[in-house]
Amino acid sequence: DTEVTQTPKHLVMGMTNKKSLKCEQHMGHRAMYWYKQKAKKPPELMFVYSYEKLSINESVPSRFSPECPNSSLLNLHLHALQPEDSALYLCASSPGSTGNTIYFGEGSWLTVV
Amino acid sequence: AQSVSQHNHHVILSEAASLELGCNYSYGGTVNLFWYVQYPGQHLQLLLKYFSGDPLVKGIKGFEAEFIKSKFSFNLRKPSVQWSDTAEYFCAANSGGYQKVTFGTGTKLQVIP
């Protein structure tokens, strides 16, 4: 079983709603990631936090706002999303050093209506 | 630009057939390579990885991959597939000094009983 836990597993939100996706890991990893995966496509990197600091932002629209409250938690705040933002959002973590294996959570299925 | 290519988009095999899925990468310098599997409706799971050393790496469930530096390839193999191997397979890579992992477009494997 994955040791990266994501909640909720499914989320339906309107375009004017504000919601958050949550991710937690207790493996002591110091790097955490948000990926977006559309159907039948590979995961696309959105954000990387390294030692609780945002280290990579792949030019993601500001309606997606990441937050890393501590080394075990990662949030993705969602506001004013568009229907095309509907996708599987994957959280992942790695020990922190470059080149380490990335471990994925089960994902949160997001539908924007 | 760094990229990962998977040329087989959809592969259909009968049970007990041998499998080889192609993966090519374009990275300069040190590269780390991964194969992930995504079973229908499930999260990404690591099959195997190559960081350095023996270019033939063995993973879970009888899979193996060979790193051939001169060909920039990291093909996935399995001598005899089972129906339960039906899944999407993603090759991925990152360079030694960078956290961003780039995924290939994936290969959908369908094993017919």
Image: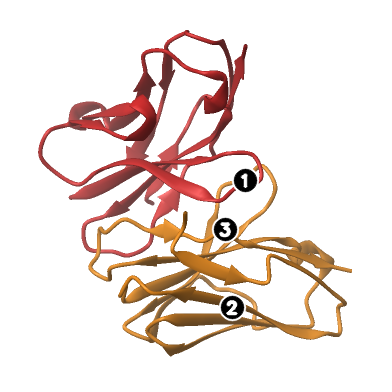
Chain colours: A orange, B red
Mark 2, chain letter? A
Residue at the outermost front position: A1
Residue B87 lies in what quarter of the image?
top right
Q: Which residue is mark 2?
A: A22
Q: In the rendering, at what x and y percent does residue A24 appear?
A: 48, 76
Question: Tag 1: residue type?
Answer: Lys
Q: In the rendering, at what x and y percent does residue B15 appear?
A: 54, 10
CA–CA distance in space, label 1 to label 3: 16 Å
Mark 3, secondary structure of its residue? loop
CA–CA distance in space, label 2 to label 3: 12 Å
Please state which of residues B1 and B9 is positioned toward the viewer in this rendering: B9
Q: In the rendering, at what x and y percent does residue A27 appear?
A: 33, 70
**Disc assigned to residue A4:** none
Mark 2, secondary structure of its residue? strand
Question: Tag 3: residue type?
Answer: Glu
**In the depicted structure, whether residue A112 falls above or below residue A20:** above
Q: In the rendering, at what x and y percent does residue B1 appear?
A: 38, 51
Mark 1, chain letter? A
Badge 3: few (under 14), some or many (20 or more) residues near its Cα, within 10 Å?
Answer: many
Q: Which residue is mark 3?
A: A106
Give me the residue at 30% from left, 75% from top: A28
**Disc assigned to residue A41:** 1
Please state which of residues B21 and A21 is positioned toward the viewer in this rendering: A21
Instruction: Say if residue B28 shows up in the picture.
Output: no
Instruction: Say if residue A44 shows up in the picture.
Output: yes
